[in-house]
Image: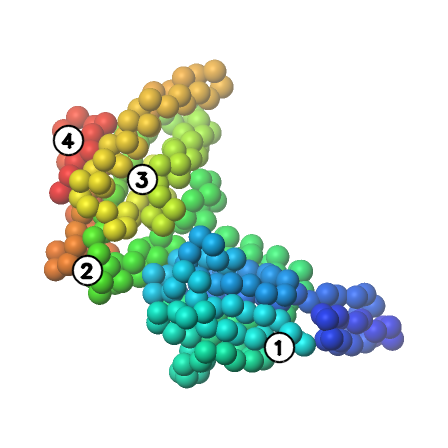
Amino acid sequence: MCKDKVTVIHKNLILEDPAYSKEITLKPVISVIHGIDKGRIFPFTSSVTIGRGSNADFIINDEQISRIHIKVTLKANAFIIEDMGSTNGTYIEGNKINNLTAVAGSVVHIGESKLVFSLKSEAQIDTEKELYKAAATDALTEISSRLWFMKRADEEIVYARNTDLPLTMIMLDIDFFKKVNDNYGHLAGDYILKQLAAILLKHKRKNDLLGRYGGEEFILLLKDLTAEEAVLISERIRQAVESAEFIYRDHKIPITISMGVCSMQGDNLVDLTNCILIADKLLYKAKENGRNKVEIG
């Protein structure tokens, strides 16, 4: 064992470990350990605001969280937590708080999310970010993976049912995708999938959910839209794909998509499995009716 000491410094925090001989700096970090954004990690400096609004420093996609829900300030190695007048309150160990000084490791409950504040090294932060990305992201298209989408969508459906908000489930896939792979190769197919994902990202709203369901099939969940508005967005996406230029190694590849669109609200809003089943049946109806169509149910 090396006799030199490592000094771990964060403001007034100094730890010594004789096993190493380099200095490590710890940074304050928020980790989401439960809820829609479980697995996310957010390093900050001295203070941070947390909420679902676009002006929050750390945005959590939880409809039960206020736009600016809490402010957290690191002071003398303790986390000062201030509720910013949230609608649903802030809780630690089941107790509602307005202002609280918490030690590292304390679990803070806001909305349906649970957060932990701690001090971590750069290496720990990088590792956690990579683990989150691997779990949440489809490696090829860099949109949400199927499992991550399903988890998020299930929570959104429960919330919509409790609040009587409308939701629209959309299943879509690429028409004659097998011919793309057969005629141009699988690398061309991968290129098409990535380009389509980029188009979908461009046309979805910030709070809508998008995932790769499998193969050439994608899935969208649109929140708080009328059926008519959802159909307009779907048709806009279909037209954008039809008019886009997909060029791979000097080959222009014509691409269209078929879509199944199912809007539900209140007593008509079924569970996730049945939402997907209904949208999938509509997708196949669009294919049976000639493809490059939006089928509505």
Q: Pointer 3: what residue? A: 217
The C terminus - image quarter: top left
Q: Give the alpha-carbon distance from disc 3 to disc 4, as whole Å.
A: 16 Å
Q: Which marked residue is nearer to the observer: mark 3 or mark 2? A: 2
Q: Quadrant of residue 290?
A: top left
Q: Which marked residue is nearer to the observer: mark 3 or mark 1? A: 1
The N terminus - image quarter: bottom right
Label 4 element class: helix
| As drawn, 187 above or below 3 | above
For residue 78, the mark is 1
Q: Are marks 3 and 2 in contact (CB under 8 Å)?
A: no
First in sequence: mark 2 vs mark 1: 1
- Residue positioned 87% across, 73% down in the render: 4
Q: Amino acid at mark 3?
A: Glu
Q: Amino acid at mark 2?
A: Asp
- Residue positioned 51% across, 68% down in the render: 71
First in sequence: mark 3 vs mark 2: 2
Q: Pointer 4: what residue? A: 288
